[in-house]
Image (tube, rainbow, N blue to C red):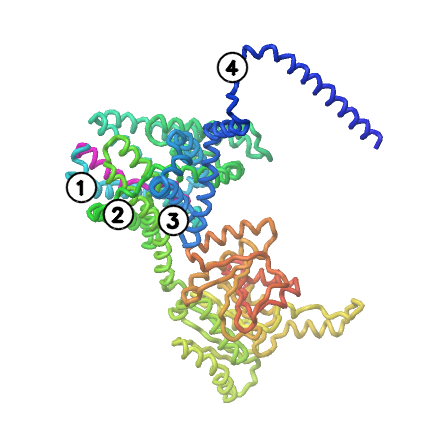
Amino acid sequence: MRKSRRNYTLYAVMMVVFCSLIYFAVSSGERFSHLQKQPPSADTSPFDIFLNIMAGNMSHPLAMLLFQMIIILVFVRIFSRIFKYIGQPGVIGEIVAGIVLGPSLLGYLWPGISDVLFPARSLPNLELVSQIGLVLFMFVIGMELDFGILKNKINETLVISHAGIVVPFFLGTVSSFWVYEEYAAGQTDFLPFALFLGISMSITAFPVLARIVQERNKTHTPVGILSLASAANDDVTAWCLLAVVIAIAKAGTFVSALYTIGLTAAYILFMFLVARPFLKKIGALYANKEVINKSFVGFIFLVLIISSVTTEVIGIHALFGAFMAGVVMPVNFGFRKVMMEKVEDIATVLFLPLFFAYTGLNTQIGLINSPALWGICLMFILVSITGKLGGCALAARAVGESWKDSLIIGTLMNTRGLMELVALNIGREMGVLPPEIFAILVLMALSTSFMTTPLLILIEKLYRNKPELNKYKRLVLCFGRPDSGRLLLNVARVLFGKQLKQMKVVAAHYTLGTDLAPVKAMQYARESFEPIVKEANKLHLKIDKRYKVTDKLNQEIVKLGNEAATDLLLLGAGPRFMSGESHTENKAGFNIPLISSLFNLLRNTPMHLPGVLLRRKIENIMSRVECPVAVFENRDFRRASRYFFIISCEADLFMLGYLGTIFSNGVSKVKIYIHAAAESEKILEEKIEAAAAEYAGQVETAHLMTPDTRFYPQKDILFMSYDACKELAADSRLYELLPSFLAIRPQVTGNVKQD
């Protein structure tokens, strides 16, 4: 306390002494007042002086830029949420936000406000910042692209991307015949006008496509990778063609364009033959280091900037240099993850929306003001869709992709977005594109971008309702109690959906013991199969009935499961079969030898407990069959209306293969619980969302299941792996709250026990 008082006293004395000295020094400087500039007028109040200072501060380029960033980010977040709500990717909302802030809406309705918020002198600064954000984003996209996967599909990529160039380019030049004479003849020559129309039909908006692929969790899927690679090739080619068109428009010669194309080819060769091996060697030095130091991060950014400025100087766009820099980064150490964590959020959340907004600020749609112009607009939209979507889809199909993936690739490649607007602005500034045609092409670019998500959803729905025929061929049901057969058939219908009608269904029932009279056996067989036959008739299914009197239950089930082309062996289990085995001990913990011996004898001897298989017997069967085995535990199950999955580790992801057949039966929603450790929960969630991306809006994920989770036994059904079931059974609280469930062990080969 005494020390604190002394410090406060020292502080007070110091402030009094030095403030007095400062006042004395300033007062002594009054003798220089005759040398100062003219003081403010006496009529100007101090508050007016303050307002003038504030106005000057607001007009400063930095303050203006920061103020514009605030406005843009607020509008971008609002429109992004709105568009996500209506099922569009947020990136389309960001584009529309820029259009709203530009002359198309804000400048048209309130020009005074628009001039104050976005004066013309401030736009160059906004453009530079937005371009930096786009360069960072493309660097991240390049790092996320696994180029090694593309080695086997380089031919497909070239075919698809160049089909997406030549077909729409041809259709664009042909369409110029109908509009040149009336709208462009007085402003430009036919050749550059036709070439600019062709290039406008050929460009794919790689950043917008990448955002859509990213938001739909297709970045690491084969169709997503092929689309990204094709779009990258498409845009590199398109920018080279744009350089040719610019050269022709300016000088009427191909020579300048040939220089650009040659330098671009040399740059790409240098990046793959020199830069990539060099970075790989440097990456090997950091492979075993726990921390990537700032010097190395600075070196990576230096490579990014050099690559970007090289492509910018050559004549293609800086973003392709950023993309190439990301592609050639080494893949043998964890720096990619670190770099993406450092760059991705700041690029996508802060800088990239500025690029979308800036382009929107330079777009004016109100020039389309007559029926003739709207007719031309519709024609250009149809031509662009036919050339780009149709050309890429047919090319993808020709190189061996399925119709579904081909249509997805064509739809994604049809996205033009703001890369199109960049090319259009070049044509407008050169005077090649008249204002009306420029506005029409802008609307075409926005329309083809806006339609991407609805088309993807439509394609997924069309092909989701057509599950692969003959994917599953044979189902074996083994049941004890007669009513168990009916329940197992209903469970199989839930699991396989419409595919069940294409399968051979074998229903097996065994009576234990060899001293049963034949007449009695026939009666047992008839009574046992009666419920399942009635249920099969309702479902319009034919079943192959198998009945046998035997004292070797396990062996008979194993023999049936190992018959050729069995896709699933479905067994009925006893209630709480996982928790039904424990050692018999007295309360003090001492074994009772006689009871233990009797228990072991009963446990290892085949028993006829109708409809009941204990855990040990089930696992004995599993160890001797190669086909998948599913165990259904009935907990008062009636008919499914809610559907749940439990995924606890990566080995359980095989369960997602059943989503297609489940949804084929009209199921609208499946909820997946991720019952995993915290460190692996996020990884599993990402993989589940990626695998279930084609079922947009139908798969819901939730965190770890807790004792508070509520199920309805009569209408809920749960699917999980057999290993996950054993894990849950270790926690009696969780195991007891489960509804009726199907525990599936996937197919195994080479590790089964032989009889």
Asked if residue 155 is positioned above or below residue 716 in the image, the reply reads above
Q: Which quadrant holds residue 665? A: bottom left
Q: Nearer the viewer, mark 1 or mark 2?
A: 1
Indicate left or right for 199 with 641 as reference: left
Residue 662: % across, % down: 44, 65
Residue 273 seen from this side: no
Between 679 and 190, the one lying in front of the other is: 190
Secondary structure of the residue carrying numbered label 4: loop
Q: Is residue 194 magenta?
A: yes
Mark 1 to mark 4 CA distance (whole Å): 64 Å
The residue sitting at 36% across, 38% down in the picture is 111
State the extent of the magenta-drawn residues as a range.
188-211
Dot 2 falls on a residue whose secondary structure is: helix
Residue 181 visible to the viewer:
yes
Q: Which residue is labeled 3 in the image? A: 223
N-terminal-most mark, 3 or 1: 1
The quadrant of the picture occupied by the C terminus is bottom right
Label 3 or label 2, whichever comes before in sequence order: 3
Local crowd size for mark 3, using a 10 Å CA cut-off: few (<14), some (14–19), many (≥20): some
Please give the label number shown on residue 179. Answer: 1
x, y (%) of residue 167?
24, 43
Q: CA distance from mark 1 to mark 2?
A: 14 Å
First reached walking from the N terminus: tag 1 or tag 2: 1
Q: Assess whether residue 622 is covered by the magenta stretch.
A: no
Residue 37 is labelled as 4
Q: Earlier in the sequence, mark 1 or mark 4?
A: 4
